Every structure is written in C-alpha cells, then in structure tokens.
Amino acid sequence: MDKKKLQKFFNTNPFKGFFKKNRLRPPGAVEEPKFMELCIRCARCIEVCPYDSIKRADIFERLQIGTPYIFAEEKGCYLCMKCPSVCPTGALDNNLKEPEKVEMGIAVINQETCLNFKYYLDEEKGVTEEGLLCSFCYDSCPLRDRAIVMEHFILPVITDECVGCGVCTEKCPTTPKSVNIIPKGMEQKELAGFYYRKLRINAQKKSSKIKEEYENKTESEVKKKENISSFGVKPEFKNNFEPMDTIDEWEEQ
C-alpha cells in the first residue's frame, strides 16, 4: 500500500473515532481529515496560548497522538485568537481573526442535571428540594448574551451563535457536567464514525423525550397549583404531618 492510500485509509476509517464530546480542536482548525494531513505536531499553537488551554493528545488518543486539543472539562478556549496565525501549515486558518467566526463545536445543556432547570421545575411544583441557582455558564461565556442567553432570567439557553469554546463546560459546577460541547464535525455522518453516529442519534432521541416529558409535566403542575387556595382549607401533605390551627407563642403575645 503506497503512502497516499495509507494516508487516505487512516483519515477515512469510520472506527478511528475522531470525535469525543468536550475534546476540541483549536480555533480555525480545518475539517478533521484535512487537519490530520496538515498538522505537523510542531506545538506552536500550544506554546502561544496564554491560558494554557491547548494540550497535546497523549497515547490514549490513538492516531491523534501529539496533535493539539482543547479538553473543555479541564480548560476551555478563551478566544484570544493567537493560535491560528502561528500555524505554519494551514491546519489552523491563518486568516481567522474574529472570535465570532470560530467554529469549534456547539454547547448542549442537560436539563436533567442543570441546577437552574431543576430549580425551575421545582418552582412549578411549589416546592424546591435543593434551592440552588447557578449562572457560571452565562457569566463566563466570552460571547455572553449572544451565544448564551437567560430565558425567564433563570434558564440558560444556547443560541446558534455559540462557537463551542468550552468555557461554560470548564466552569460548570455539577458532576457530571451539565453543559457539554459537541465538536465540529461530530454531527457529520461521513466524518464521525459508526460509534459516534450511534451516540448522536441516541442523544437526539433522549433530548426529544425529555422535552416532551418536561412540557407535559409542567402543564399539569401549573394547573394543580392554580387550584390550590391558602384560605379556609387545610392543605394535604404526603408525609405524616398535622397542620396547626393556632400557634401558642402567638396567642400569649
């Protein structure tokens, strides 16, 4: 097998697994197969990064060993835009200057574990178990109010302007992370590989199911709350608890 055929095999092998969530190429990276052809592992992008966000892929990253990655759970990209201009081969687009034009991926929020979504659902029921609110993803976003907005002043929502920098993932306080980055290209069937395509399809199905359950549950809880009156009727409690008609301390006063 000659060099070109061997190179083509490694760059198109569907089981190679180019993509993992929260593992991102630096800003300006060309499509993965082309990136693997062009990157000479010179580490210039790693050296120039002032935030120490870019790391070398280690031996566990298979054929990508030595190439630059941003591991968002450890450190996101702060879009300083210093790395694209120092790439000697064009693996990173030297002409990319504006942070808004970066395409590293897209953030996805898990509403089942996000503190704000859990709080919002609890509020609809009239009681909250944890009472925790968070705005780390919103506050830390380099493109705040553009890539991420707060609906109802409480719910973080990712917009189409998200560039996938991963800072929100880095700052997210939950374990596991409630906001994750889907790398650019992971949604493309011809690039992602069999296992990652399957993961993507399952994630979409789960997301649709969660949304449907959320909408149905919220509607029923709102109706239930509207029918509750605080006057003249003792509330029913699930646990063994007897509400008091009077409070002794108040009567003494």
Image (cartoon, rainbow, N blue to C red):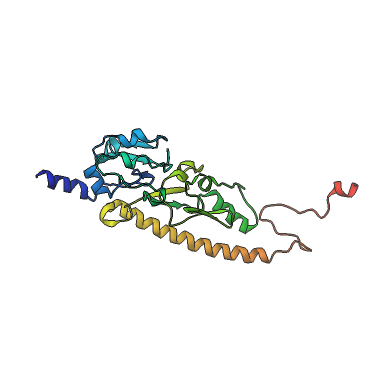
In percent of width and height, residue 183 lies at: 35, 49
Task: Pick the residue in front: 98 or 104.
Answer: 98
Can the viewer see residue 228 in this picture?
yes
Can the viewer see residue 111 in this picture?
no
Q: Residue furthest right?
A: 253
Task: Pick the residue in front: 156 or 44.
Answer: 44
Instruction: Answer left or right for 2 relative to 224.
Output: left
Residue found 66% across the figure and 55% down from its top: 238
Q: Is residue 244 above or below residue 136?
A: below
Residue found 24% across the figure and 44% down from its top: 36
In percent of width and height, residue 131 lies at: 62, 48
Instruction: Answer left or right for 219 relative to 89.
Output: right
Task: Pick the residue in front: 48 or 240.
Answer: 48
The image quadrant that residue 125 belongs to is bottom right
- Name the quadrant of the N terminus: top left
Q: Residue furthest top?
A: 47
